[in-house]
Amino acid sequence: MTTTLMRLFAGETLATPPIWLMRQAGRYLPEYRETRGKAGSFLDLCFNTELATEVTLQPIRRFGFDASILFSDILVVPHAMGQKVWFEEGEGPRLEQIETAEALRQRPLRFDLDRLSPVIRTVERLRRELPAETTLIGFCGAPWTVASYMIAGKGTADQAPARLVAYRDPDFLSAMIDQLVDASIVYLKAQLAAGAEVVQIFESFASALTPGGLERWSIEPIRRIITGVKASYPASKVIVFARGAAGVLGQYATITGADGFGIDWGADLAQTVRQLPDTIVSQGNLDPLALVAGGEALDNGVKAMLAVARSRRHILNLGHGIVPQTPIAHVERMMTLVRGRAV
Protein backbone atom coordinates (compact mmCIF):
# COMPACT_ATOMS: atom_id res chain seq x y z
CA MET A 1 0.00 0.00 0.00
CA THR A 2 1.30 3.45 -0.92
CA THR A 3 0.84 5.87 1.98
CA THR A 4 -0.29 9.47 1.58
CA LEU A 5 3.17 10.73 2.50
CA MET A 6 4.85 8.53 -0.11
CA ARG A 7 2.27 9.54 -2.73
CA LEU A 8 3.29 13.12 -2.04
CA PHE A 9 6.95 12.27 -2.59
CA ALA A 10 5.97 10.41 -5.77
CA GLY A 11 4.66 13.68 -7.22
CA GLU A 12 0.97 13.86 -6.29
CA THR A 13 -0.67 16.97 -4.86
CA LEU A 14 -3.36 15.69 -2.52
CA ALA A 15 -6.71 17.24 -1.70
CA THR A 16 -6.18 16.25 1.94
CA PRO A 17 -2.47 16.72 2.70
CA PRO A 18 -0.67 14.36 5.09
CA ILE A 19 -0.04 15.47 8.65
CA TRP A 20 2.30 14.46 11.46
CA LEU A 21 3.86 16.45 14.29
CA MET A 22 7.43 16.65 15.45
CA ARG A 23 7.72 15.14 18.96
CA GLN A 24 4.21 13.76 18.57
CA ALA A 25 5.16 11.05 21.08
CA GLY A 26 5.69 13.07 24.23
CA ARG A 27 4.69 14.44 27.61
CA TYR A 28 1.43 16.05 26.47
CA LEU A 29 0.00 12.48 26.28
CA PRO A 30 -0.97 10.81 29.58
CA GLU A 31 -0.19 7.38 28.12
CA TYR A 32 3.34 8.57 27.30
CA ARG A 33 3.87 9.83 30.85
CA GLU A 34 2.72 6.48 32.21
CA THR A 35 5.06 4.53 29.93
CA ARG A 36 7.94 6.94 30.57
CA GLY A 37 7.58 6.22 34.30
CA LYS A 38 8.28 2.53 33.66
CA ALA A 39 11.47 3.12 31.73
CA GLY A 40 13.82 4.72 34.25
CA SER A 41 15.87 7.33 32.45
CA PHE A 42 15.03 8.97 29.14
CA LEU A 43 17.94 7.16 27.50
CA ASP A 44 16.67 3.88 28.95
CA LEU A 45 13.36 4.56 27.20
CA CYS A 46 15.16 5.15 23.89
CA PHE A 47 17.00 1.83 24.24
CA ASN A 48 14.04 -0.25 25.44
CA THR A 49 12.61 -1.66 22.21
CA GLU A 50 9.26 -2.61 23.73
CA LEU A 51 8.64 0.74 25.43
CA ALA A 52 10.05 2.84 22.58
CA THR A 53 7.73 1.02 20.19
CA GLU A 54 4.80 1.63 22.51
CA VAL A 55 5.33 5.38 22.84
CA THR A 56 5.87 5.72 19.08
CA LEU A 57 2.52 4.02 18.44
CA GLN A 58 0.54 5.97 21.05
CA PRO A 59 -0.13 9.14 18.99
CA ILE A 60 -0.97 7.02 15.95
CA ARG A 61 -3.63 5.15 17.92
CA ARG A 62 -5.04 8.35 19.38
CA PHE A 63 -4.96 10.71 16.39
CA GLY A 64 -4.28 8.63 13.27
CA PHE A 65 -1.40 10.77 11.99
CA ASP A 66 -0.22 9.94 8.47
CA ALA A 67 3.34 9.31 9.63
CA SER A 68 5.03 7.92 12.71
CA ILE A 69 8.51 9.07 13.63
CA LEU A 70 10.77 6.72 15.54
CA PHE A 71 11.00 7.57 19.24
CA SER A 72 14.68 8.13 19.98
CA ASP A 73 17.09 11.06 20.30
CA ILE A 74 19.75 12.66 18.13
CA LEU A 75 22.35 12.08 20.88
CA VAL A 76 22.28 8.30 20.58
CA VAL A 77 24.91 8.77 17.86
CA PRO A 78 27.61 10.28 20.13
CA HIS A 79 26.63 7.61 22.68
CA ALA A 80 27.36 4.97 20.04
CA MET A 81 30.67 6.71 19.33
CA GLY A 82 31.74 6.17 22.94
CA GLN A 83 30.99 9.59 24.41
CA LYS A 84 29.25 9.52 27.79
CA VAL A 85 25.67 10.79 27.40
CA TRP A 86 22.99 11.12 30.05
CA PHE A 87 19.84 13.15 30.72
CA GLU A 88 19.25 15.26 33.81
CA GLU A 89 15.58 15.27 34.78
CA GLY A 90 14.10 18.69 34.08
CA GLU A 91 17.35 20.01 32.59
CA GLY A 92 17.96 18.01 29.42
CA PRO A 93 20.96 16.21 27.93
CA ARG A 94 24.45 16.17 29.37
CA LEU A 95 27.58 14.87 27.67
CA GLU A 96 31.19 14.43 28.71
CA GLN A 97 32.69 17.41 26.90
CA ILE A 98 35.14 17.06 24.02
CA GLU A 99 36.43 20.59 23.55
CA THR A 100 39.87 20.18 21.98
CA ALA A 101 41.80 18.09 19.50
CA GLU A 102 43.90 16.79 22.41
CA ALA A 103 40.77 15.58 24.20
CA LEU A 104 39.71 13.80 21.03
CA ARG A 105 43.12 12.15 20.74
CA GLN A 106 42.97 11.00 24.35
CA ARG A 107 39.46 9.65 23.97
CA PRO A 108 39.04 8.62 20.32
CA LEU A 109 35.49 8.28 19.06
CA ARG A 110 34.60 5.14 17.12
CA PHE A 111 31.04 4.61 15.97
CA ASP A 112 29.65 1.20 16.91
CA LEU A 113 26.28 0.48 15.30
CA ASP A 114 25.82 -2.50 17.63
CA ARG A 115 25.28 -0.04 20.48
CA LEU A 116 22.19 1.15 18.63
CA SER A 117 20.80 -2.32 17.94
CA PRO A 118 17.83 -1.74 20.31
CA VAL A 119 16.88 1.31 18.23
CA ILE A 120 17.12 -0.64 14.99
CA ARG A 121 14.98 -3.39 16.52
CA THR A 122 12.42 -0.70 17.39
CA VAL A 123 12.30 0.32 13.72
CA GLU A 124 11.79 -3.30 12.70
CA ARG A 125 9.02 -3.78 15.22
CA LEU A 126 7.30 -0.54 14.25
CA ARG A 127 7.29 -1.59 10.62
CA ARG A 128 5.40 -4.74 11.62
CA GLU A 129 2.96 -3.04 14.01
CA LEU A 130 2.13 0.26 12.34
CA PRO A 131 -1.01 0.48 10.20
CA ALA A 132 -0.25 -0.07 6.52
CA GLU A 133 -1.35 3.49 5.72
CA THR A 134 1.18 5.05 8.12
CA THR A 135 4.62 6.08 6.87
CA LEU A 136 7.53 5.25 9.17
CA ILE A 137 10.10 8.04 9.54
CA GLY A 138 13.59 7.53 10.92
CA PHE A 139 15.98 10.34 11.77
CA CYS A 140 19.34 11.60 12.94
CA GLY A 141 20.78 14.92 14.01
CA ALA A 142 22.80 17.00 11.57
CA PRO A 143 26.56 16.97 12.30
CA TRP A 144 26.74 20.65 13.29
CA THR A 145 23.89 20.31 15.80
CA VAL A 146 25.25 17.09 17.29
CA ALA A 147 28.82 18.45 17.42
CA SER A 148 27.52 21.51 19.29
CA TYR A 149 26.26 19.24 22.07
CA MET A 150 29.42 17.14 22.04
CA ILE A 151 31.65 20.18 22.47
CA ALA A 152 29.56 22.12 25.02
CA GLY A 153 28.40 19.04 26.95
CA LYS A 154 24.83 20.37 26.89
CA GLY A 155 22.48 22.58 24.93
CA THR A 156 23.50 26.24 24.95
CA ALA A 157 21.60 29.40 24.04
CA ASP A 158 23.73 30.43 21.07
CA GLN A 159 26.12 27.47 20.54
CA ALA A 160 29.02 29.73 21.56
CA PRO A 161 31.36 26.86 22.57
CA ALA A 162 31.09 25.19 19.14
CA ARG A 163 31.26 28.50 17.32
CA LEU A 164 34.48 29.40 19.16
CA VAL A 165 35.97 26.03 18.23
CA ALA A 166 35.03 26.68 14.60
CA TYR A 167 37.11 29.87 14.69
CA ARG A 168 40.00 28.67 16.88
CA ASP A 169 40.50 25.13 15.63
CA PRO A 170 38.51 24.43 12.47
CA ASP A 171 40.58 21.32 11.76
CA PHE A 172 39.40 19.78 15.03
CA LEU A 173 35.77 20.61 14.30
CA SER A 174 36.16 19.32 10.76
CA ALA A 175 37.48 16.00 12.08
CA MET A 176 34.51 15.69 14.44
CA ILE A 177 32.05 16.62 11.68
CA ASP A 178 33.64 14.01 9.37
CA GLN A 179 33.13 11.31 11.99
CA LEU A 180 29.53 12.36 12.47
CA VAL A 181 28.87 12.32 8.73
CA ASP A 182 30.19 8.76 8.46
CA ALA A 183 28.26 7.61 11.55
CA SER A 184 25.04 9.23 10.36
CA ILE A 185 25.24 7.52 6.98
CA VAL A 186 25.63 4.10 8.61
CA TYR A 187 22.86 4.81 11.12
CA LEU A 188 20.32 6.09 8.58
CA LYS A 189 21.05 3.21 6.21
CA ALA A 190 20.41 0.79 9.08
CA GLN A 191 17.06 2.46 9.76
CA LEU A 192 16.08 2.22 6.10
CA ALA A 193 17.12 -1.42 5.98
CA ALA A 194 14.96 -2.07 9.06
CA GLY A 195 11.84 -0.57 7.47
CA ALA A 196 11.91 3.23 7.61
CA GLU A 197 10.53 4.78 4.42
CA VAL A 198 11.62 8.37 5.01
CA VAL A 199 14.43 9.80 7.15
CA GLN A 200 14.66 13.31 8.54
CA ILE A 201 17.86 15.17 9.41
CA PHE A 202 17.42 17.65 12.26
CA GLU A 203 19.59 20.76 12.03
CA SER A 204 18.33 22.53 15.13
CA PHE A 205 21.10 25.15 15.31
CA ALA A 206 21.42 26.41 11.74
CA SER A 207 20.62 29.96 12.87
CA ALA A 208 23.82 30.13 14.96
CA LEU A 209 26.08 30.02 11.91
CA THR A 210 27.40 32.81 9.71
CA PRO A 211 26.69 32.49 5.96
CA GLY A 212 30.15 31.04 5.33
CA GLY A 213 29.91 28.77 8.34
CA LEU A 214 26.48 27.61 7.27
CA GLU A 215 27.77 26.15 4.02
CA ARG A 216 30.87 24.59 5.58
CA TRP A 217 29.43 23.19 8.80
CA SER A 218 25.79 22.55 7.93
CA ILE A 219 24.93 22.38 4.24
CA GLU A 220 27.97 20.47 2.99
CA PRO A 221 27.92 17.78 5.75
CA ILE A 222 24.20 17.24 5.16
CA ARG A 223 24.88 16.90 1.43
CA ARG A 224 27.47 14.23 2.15
CA ILE A 225 25.06 12.31 4.38
CA ILE A 226 22.33 12.35 1.75
CA THR A 227 24.75 11.33 -0.98
CA GLY A 228 26.01 8.46 1.17
CA VAL A 229 22.52 7.25 2.04
CA LYS A 230 21.23 7.45 -1.52
CA ALA A 231 24.26 5.58 -2.86
CA SER A 232 22.81 2.50 -1.15
CA TYR A 233 19.12 3.49 -1.09
CA PRO A 234 18.53 5.62 -4.20
CA ALA A 235 14.74 5.52 -3.78
CA SER A 236 14.85 6.70 -0.16
CA LYS A 237 13.36 10.08 0.73
CA VAL A 238 15.17 12.55 2.97
CA ILE A 239 13.68 15.59 4.71
CA VAL A 240 15.94 18.28 6.16
CA PHE A 241 14.65 20.44 9.00
CA ALA A 242 17.06 23.37 9.35
CA ARG A 243 15.67 25.59 12.08
CA GLY A 244 16.33 29.28 11.52
CA ALA A 245 17.43 28.80 7.91
CA ALA A 246 14.24 29.84 6.11
CA GLY A 247 16.05 32.60 4.24
CA VAL A 248 18.56 30.19 2.70
CA LEU A 249 16.43 27.13 2.03
CA GLY A 250 17.03 27.65 -1.66
CA GLN A 251 20.76 27.16 -1.01
CA TYR A 252 20.08 24.00 1.00
CA ALA A 253 17.82 22.73 -1.79
CA THR A 254 20.38 23.40 -4.52
CA ILE A 255 23.28 21.74 -2.72
CA THR A 256 22.06 18.96 -0.42
CA GLY A 257 19.91 16.79 -2.68
CA ALA A 258 17.14 16.53 -0.05
CA ASP A 259 13.64 15.54 -1.14
CA GLY A 260 11.83 17.68 1.41
CA PHE A 261 12.40 20.62 3.75
CA GLY A 262 10.81 21.43 7.07
CA ILE A 263 10.14 25.11 7.74
CA ASP A 264 10.24 26.54 11.25
CA TRP A 265 7.48 28.62 12.82
CA GLY A 266 9.43 31.89 12.56
CA ALA A 267 9.16 31.92 8.77
CA ASP A 268 6.39 33.15 6.51
CA LEU A 269 5.32 29.84 4.99
CA ALA A 270 3.84 31.11 1.73
CA GLN A 271 6.90 33.26 1.07
CA THR A 272 9.46 30.64 2.10
CA VAL A 273 8.14 27.85 -0.13
CA ARG A 274 8.75 30.04 -3.16
CA GLN A 275 12.47 29.36 -2.71
CA LEU A 276 11.90 25.63 -3.22
CA PRO A 277 11.59 23.95 -6.61
CA ASP A 278 8.30 22.19 -7.32
CA THR A 279 10.18 18.89 -7.20
CA ILE A 280 10.76 19.34 -3.45
CA VAL A 281 8.15 18.67 -0.78
CA SER A 282 7.71 21.35 1.89
CA GLN A 283 6.71 20.72 5.50
CA GLY A 284 5.52 22.80 8.44
CA ASN A 285 5.16 25.26 10.03
CA LEU A 286 2.52 25.92 12.72
CA ASP A 287 3.87 27.64 15.84
CA PRO A 288 3.72 25.04 18.65
CA LEU A 289 2.32 27.75 20.92
CA ALA A 290 -0.55 28.36 18.51
CA LEU A 291 -1.43 24.71 19.10
CA VAL A 292 -1.28 25.37 22.84
CA ALA A 293 -3.42 28.50 22.54
CA GLY A 294 -6.07 26.96 20.31
CA GLY A 295 -9.00 29.03 19.10
CA GLU A 296 -8.42 31.57 16.35
CA ALA A 297 -4.61 31.21 16.50
CA LEU A 298 -4.84 27.50 15.79
CA ASP A 299 -7.54 27.80 13.15
CA ASN A 300 -5.73 30.54 11.23
CA GLY A 301 -2.41 28.69 11.39
CA VAL A 302 -3.91 25.49 10.01
CA LYS A 303 -5.75 27.41 7.28
CA ALA A 304 -2.46 29.03 6.21
CA MET A 305 -0.83 25.61 5.85
CA LEU A 306 -3.81 24.25 3.94
CA ALA A 307 -3.66 27.21 1.56
CA VAL A 308 -0.06 26.35 0.70
CA ALA A 309 -0.95 22.66 0.34
CA ARG A 310 -3.53 23.50 -2.33
CA SER A 311 -0.83 24.77 -4.67
CA ARG A 312 2.15 22.51 -3.94
CA ARG A 313 3.12 19.24 -2.31
CA HIS A 314 3.12 20.05 1.40
CA ILE A 315 3.16 18.08 4.66
CA LEU A 316 1.31 19.70 7.53
CA ASN A 317 3.42 19.84 10.67
CA LEU A 318 4.61 22.13 13.42
CA GLY A 319 7.50 24.55 13.02
CA HIS A 320 9.24 22.75 15.91
CA GLY A 321 8.34 20.03 18.39
CA ILE A 322 5.04 19.81 20.23
CA VAL A 323 5.35 21.11 23.82
CA PRO A 324 4.21 19.29 26.99
CA GLN A 325 1.45 21.78 27.89
CA THR A 326 -0.41 21.18 24.60
CA PRO A 327 -4.08 20.29 25.21
CA ILE A 328 -5.11 17.06 23.54
CA ALA A 329 -8.36 18.71 22.46
CA HIS A 330 -6.37 21.20 20.38
CA VAL A 331 -4.58 18.41 18.52
CA GLU A 332 -7.98 16.85 17.87
CA ARG A 333 -9.23 20.20 16.59
CA MET A 334 -6.24 20.42 14.25
CA MET A 335 -6.99 16.99 12.83
CA THR A 336 -10.63 17.95 12.32
CA LEU A 337 -9.64 21.11 10.45
CA VAL A 338 -7.28 19.14 8.19
CA ARG A 339 -9.50 16.15 7.49
CA GLY A 340 -12.91 17.68 7.92
CA ARG A 341 -14.01 15.10 10.43
CA ALA A 342 -13.47 14.29 14.10
CA VAL A 343 -10.66 11.91 15.01
Image (cartoon, rainbow, N blue to C red):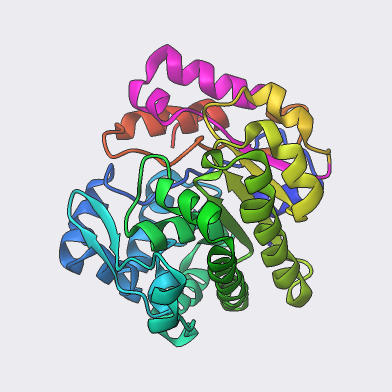
Based on the picture, tell me whether residue 47 belongs to the magenta stretch: no
Q: Position of residue 242 (x, y in %)?
A: 59, 44
Where is 221 relative to 321, above or below?
Answer: below
Quadrant of residue 185 within the rendered picture: bottom right
250 shown above or below 34? above
Q: Residue furthest top?
A: 296
Along the viewing direction, whichever of 24 and 332 lies nearer the viewer: 24
Residue at 49% across / 64% down in the picture? Answer: 130
| 240 versus 128 height, above or below | above
**Camera-nearest residue between 312 and 339:** 312
Residue at 40% over, 52% down: 61
Question: Which residue appears farthest toward the front when viewing the image?
Answer: 168
Report if residue 281 lies within the magenta region. Answer: yes
* Magenta extent: 279-307
Q: In this view of the protein, which residue sits in the foreground, 56 or 171?
A: 171
Image quadrant containing the C terminus: top left
Q: Position of residue 103 (x, y in %)?
A: 39, 75
Image mark count: 0
Q: Is residue 89 visible?
A: yes
| Drawn side of residue 251 relative to residue 51, left or right | right
Left-right relation of 5 to 110: right
Q: In the figure, residue 212 lies in which quadrant?
A: top right
Considering the whole magenta stretch, tell me its main secondary structure. helix
Residue drawn at x 50%, y 45% as measured from the top left: 205
Q: Is residue 81 left or right of residue 176?
A: left
Give the position of the N terminus as an image quadrant: bottom right
Residue 251 versus residue 188 in the image, above or below: above
